[in-house]
Image (cartoon, helix red, strand yellow):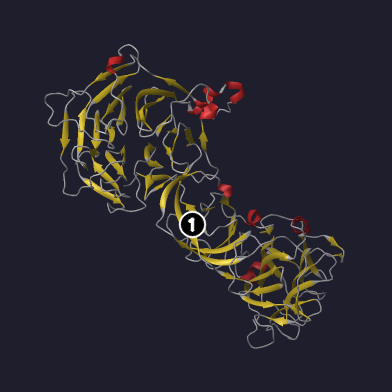
């Protein structure tokens, strides 16, 4: 991979999912969109169904509990994104229950959840702000009452009277002792000034769209002001289209003062108290404050829940079940100046199975580069001309003339020594609304050209793969690698001048050098202050890896081995990657000659020559990675692909280099 003109390009390699197929694909990651996120893998454990406390089913809507106390998560959780195992970005809504955001028990309703998901958060640029917690996107209907909504309608049951205002009057704030909302910043106030205050919400369009089934979930927050009541208050009613079946939630009519109970009943049934089906001391007494009503029907009968206490409504031995048509909030029941009401967070969904499960973290979180809308683009079909032959173990280097240069590589035992040049597209062109049909694909997506020098063909470097290459002042430098005959390591050094189209053998280094060019493959190289810094690699003479550091001066041609400034050293390795940032060489991953896979990240201070282990360890791990690619993108080391534990990876991970 190579990064240039604000564009990260990846070419070739082996497809681990297609019988180890060699690739000649060119992919572009548009970094104007992807953002850095922290990714936390989640395993959704079997939870508790509202139905019988044992059933766990993942359907359209799933309720999970996650820990959002990480200091990297924003105070309002606006940067959280949930992605299922298929890579789909999911709609979700964070409830104000169980502690809400920044809690160890944050409750979230997720649409399209799977047993294994990922939670993304901590985005410095927070792209796609409209993709965070949203009730309207998650449920079939959601009213948070932050804006006015049509709330009155005529029904087959007759024309119902509209209720009062949209926003609580100042006097009611005094009764509530402050805030007048459970979800968001505003709540719905139902006036009792009229003889019968009612508000009706039509849910029939989405119900009919779902096939008019009696499978639904309804929830709403109700604020009980603790006012005087003579009993018999109807708080909420769910009815079918003809109003012949209904479920009512209200206040016990057998009580004669404000210390009565919350009850529920269906048409033609006795009245049931929460949380049991018989009147007893276990019934839930009225209390001042917010309460949560839930009604759930999976097609086998309706069940009601108030603040977690659940009952099932039975009529003549059969559980009540019908297709809902509208929801009515009632206050006063024809008696003026009775109990006023606040409502908030009214949510309704059709055709869902609800479960509550704990979302355990399956492994440690890590920083990744992730685009919620997916911004990888396969360039090959959009180009004119022929791309380079498929290969792996090559190098690509971004040159300062706006090109990416591909050097050598291997395919099916054949080693290349060719050179290809790709003209990088200009960032401004990509963002200027260019049209491919109008402007041509080459102008928009760049172009390949074969850079085979013809003047002095005898100076072509030997064919090779698993080598290193760097760019310095417009010239390319090639060193080491292995050949196709026996896989022997090479120790030569070559320079290519693109303007002259000539190769120059620099293997004869300055006599003042204190070291010889390393004969290794699978090593790494970076450019720092006019020098090539080489690290690691596999030596085919000793059949062992090395952890030595060399530096070669472009100006003097002097090569020397850098002795470490401390006894702390990374294990010898090959197949790792390296980028330089803020005077430090960052070494990521790699493997040993004994097939140990490292998941470590080391830094080498180029001034003090001291090594420091940033994270991970040099103990073999299936999470380790080698023969991946890594590029410096802004303040991040971006890694893609590679293999570890016998598995090829398609992960796109970013490691923040600042403050390290």
Q: Nearer the viewer, residue 227 or 39?
A: 39
Extreme top residue here? Answer: 455
Give me the residue at 29% from left, 34% from top.
526
On the picture, is 90 further left or further right than 13?
A: right
Which quadrant holds residue 14?
top left
Question: Would residue 496 be visible to someone looking at this image?
Answer: yes
Count of numbered circles on the image: 1
Which quadrant holds residue 296?
bottom right
Q: Is residue 660 above or below residue 377?
A: below
Instruction: Tell me the element at label 1.
Output: loop
Q: Is residue 163 above or below residue 138?
A: below
Question: Would residue 168 be visible to someone looking at this image?
Answer: no
Q: Residues within 10 Å of mark 1 (few under 14, many from 20)?
A: few
Q: Is residue 545 above or below residue 312?
A: above
x, y percentage for residue 170? 67, 64
Give me the residue at 67% from left, 78% from top.
311
Determine which residue is flagged by label 1: 75
x, y percentage for residue 654? 40, 44
x, y percentage for residue 112? 60, 56
On the picture, is 157 further left or further right than 88?
A: right
Q: Nearer the viewer, residue 3 or 112?
A: 112
Which quadrant holds residue 461?
top left
Q: Nearer the viewer, residue 419 or 112?
A: 419
On the picture, is 119 further left or further right than 464?
A: right
Extreme bottom residue here? Answer: 280
x, y percentage for residue 615? 31, 51
Where's the N terminus, which quadrant? top left
On the picture, is 386 further left or further right than 477?
A: right
């Amino acid at each position: 991979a190579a990064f240039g003109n604000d564009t990260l390009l990846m070419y070739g390699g082996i497809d681990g999912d297609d019988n180890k197929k060699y690739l000649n694909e060119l992919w572009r990651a548009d970094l104007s969109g992807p953002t850095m996120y922290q990714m936390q893998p989640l395993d959704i454990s079997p939870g508790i169904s509202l139905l019988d406390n044992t059933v766990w089913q993942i359907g359209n809507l799933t309720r999970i509990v996650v820990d959002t106390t990480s200091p990297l998560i924003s105070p309002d959780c606006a940067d959280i994104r949930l992605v299922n195992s298929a890579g789909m970005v999911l709609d979700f809504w964070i409830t104000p229950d169980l502690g809400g955001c920044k809690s160890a028990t944050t409750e979230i309703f997720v649409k399209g959840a799977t047993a294994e998901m990922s939670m993304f958060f901590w985005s410095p640029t927070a792209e796609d702000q409209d993709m965070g917690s949203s009730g309207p996107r998650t449920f079939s209907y959601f009213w948070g009452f932050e804006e006015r909504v049509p709330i009155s309608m005529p029904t087959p049951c007759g024309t119902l009277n509209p209720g009062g205002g949209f926003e609580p009057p100042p006097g009611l704030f005094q009764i509530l002792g402050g805030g007048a909302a459970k979800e968001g910043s505003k709540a719905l106030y139902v006036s009792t000034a009229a003889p019968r205050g009612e508000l009706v919400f039509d849910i029939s369009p989405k119900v009919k769209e779902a096939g008019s089934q009696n499978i639904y979930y309804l929830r709403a927050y109700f604020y009980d002001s603790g006012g005087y009541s003579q009993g018999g208050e109807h708080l909420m009613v769910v009815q079918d289209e003809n109003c012949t079946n209904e479920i009512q939630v209200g206040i016990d009519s057998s009580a004669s003062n404000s210390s009565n109970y919350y009850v529920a009943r269906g048409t033609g049934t006795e009245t049931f108290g929460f949380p049991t089906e018989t009147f007893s001391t276990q019934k839930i007494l009225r209390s001042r404050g917010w309460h949560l009503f839930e009604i759930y029907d999976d097609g086998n009968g309706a069940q009601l829940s108030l603040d977690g206490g659940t009952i099932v409504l039975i009529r003549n031995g059969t559980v009540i079940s019908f297709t809902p048509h509208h929801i009515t909030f009632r206050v006063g029941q024809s008696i003026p100046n009775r109990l006023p009401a606040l409502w908030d967070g009214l949510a309704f969904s059709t055709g869902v199975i609800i479960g509550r499960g704990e979302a355990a973290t399956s492994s440690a979180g890590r920083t990744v580069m992730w685009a919620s809308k997916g911004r990888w683009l396969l360039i090959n079909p959009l180009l004119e001309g022929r791309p380079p032959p498929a290969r792996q173990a090559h190098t690509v280097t971004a040159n300062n003339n706006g090109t990416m240069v591909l050097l050598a590589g291997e395919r099916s035992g054949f080693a290349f020594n060719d050179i290809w040049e790709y003209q990088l597209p200009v960032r401004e062109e990509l963002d200027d609304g260019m049209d491919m049909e109008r402007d041509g694909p080459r102008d928009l997506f760049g172009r390949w050209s074969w850079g085979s020098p013809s003047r002095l063909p005898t100076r072509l470097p030997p064919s090779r793969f698993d080598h290193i290459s760097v760019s310095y002042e417009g010239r390319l430098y090639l060193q080491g690698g292995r050949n196709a005959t026996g896989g022997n390591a090479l120790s030569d050094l070559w320079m290519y001048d693109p303007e002259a189209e000539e190769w120059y053998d620099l293997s004869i280094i300055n006599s003042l050098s204190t070291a010889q060019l390393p004969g290794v493959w699978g090593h790494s190289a970076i450019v720092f202050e006019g020098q090539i810094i080489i690290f690691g690699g596999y030596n085919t003479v000793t059949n062992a890896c090395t952890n030595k550091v060399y530096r070669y001066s472009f100006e003097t041609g002097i090569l020397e081995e850098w002795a470490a400034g401390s006894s702390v050293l990374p294990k010898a390795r090959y197949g790792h990657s390296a980028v330089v940032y803020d005077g430090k060489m960052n070494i990521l991953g790699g493997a040993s000659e004994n097939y140990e896979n490292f998941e470590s990240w080391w830094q080498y201070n180029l001034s003090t020559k001291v090594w420091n282990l940033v994270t991970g360890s040099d103990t073999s791990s299936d999470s380790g990675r080698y023969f991946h690619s890594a590029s410096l993108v802004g303040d991040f080391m971006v890694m893609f692909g590679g293999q570890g534990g016998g598995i090829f990876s398609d992960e796109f991970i970013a490691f923040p280099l600042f403050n390290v």
